[in-house]
Image (spheres, rainbow, N blue to C red):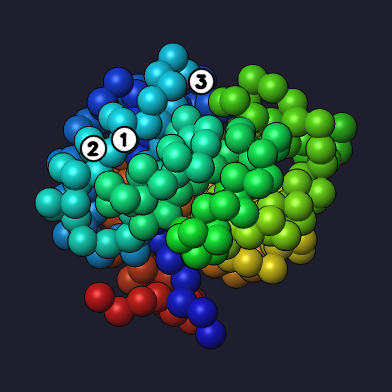
Amino acid sequence: MLKRRIIPVLLLLNGRLVKSINFGGGRDVGDPVKSAAVYNSQYADELIFLNIARDDTSVKPLAELLHRVSEVCFMPLSVGGGIRSFEDAAFLIQNGADKVVINSAAYSHLDLISRVADRFGKQAVVIGVDAKRHDGGYQAVSHGATRVAAVSIEDHLHACETAGAGEFLIQSVDQDGTMEGFDLPLLKLACSVATVPVIGCGGSGQYNHLKEAFLETDVSALACGSLFNFSDSNPMRAKAFLSNYGLQFKVV
């Protein structure tokens, strides 16, 4: 059985870590390099860095951060936010990213997914999909949840996987930062369509939320922000708790 993963997700704004609620606001929660070092000591399986600054069109600050993080952190790093071209993605991978997270650009440039997958392998391509509840179902949104995508979530997942996506990061805008639990129906929907690993994100507030998501959906990993920022929880304790329910994790 594929080992499950616990992945801290770190939102970046002007060089600092922040935590949002429903994709709005941005409460300062610390220094990204120091936080990465702490997560490294707590046996996180991976880290995801997402730049949420809307006025910065350059990925260079992300590359600079990668250099500093790689000195204190020895686990796979996924990086996204503002990737608009193959050159952006290649630049980040060549500067220390193991994976790139492509979100808004994937809706209009499926060829970008294919080019990155062909050059660096499918395992290096994570497609971020932000979703909101709508009319009893879900709609995909882009550009920081400010635009509604002109395609269904199901069709988008299928198209991206066909283009070469190796993994999906499914984020619930409604649950983001609430600490009230993951949107399980959304995760079930994504897992029913995708045949590659799905990472669920948005809403973790206690270990039972992780247990429910792992046991009731087919997600391969869960990404957490508020759970680790606003409580004494950490990846090592989360794994110890979840192991009691037959869930297997990588031994570090």
Q: In this view, does 67 lie to the left or right of 166?
A: left
Task: Tell me where residue 71 appears, x and y as whole percent.
Answer: 12, 51
Considering every residue shown, the one lying at the far right of the view is 135
Which residue occupies 43% across, 70% down? 242
Question: Is residue 119 shown to the viewer in this render?
Answer: yes
Which residue occupies 44% across, 14% down? 55
Image disc number at residue 62: 1
> Between 204 and 164, which is closer to the camera in this rendering?
164
Which residue occupies 53% across, 85% down? 1
Image disc number at residue 141: none
Q: Name the residue carrying label 2.
A: 65
Image disc number at residue 24: 3
Q: Which quarter of the rendered picture does the C terminus lie within?
A: bottom left
**Mark-to-mark CA distance, 1 and 2:** 5 Å
Amino acid under label 3? Gly
Amino acid under label 1? Leu
Amino acid under label 2? Leu
Task: Tell me where residue 95 appears, x and y as whole percent.
Answer: 27, 47
Which residue occupies 68% across, 45% down? 110
- Which one is earlier in the sequence, the residue at label 3 or at label 2? 3
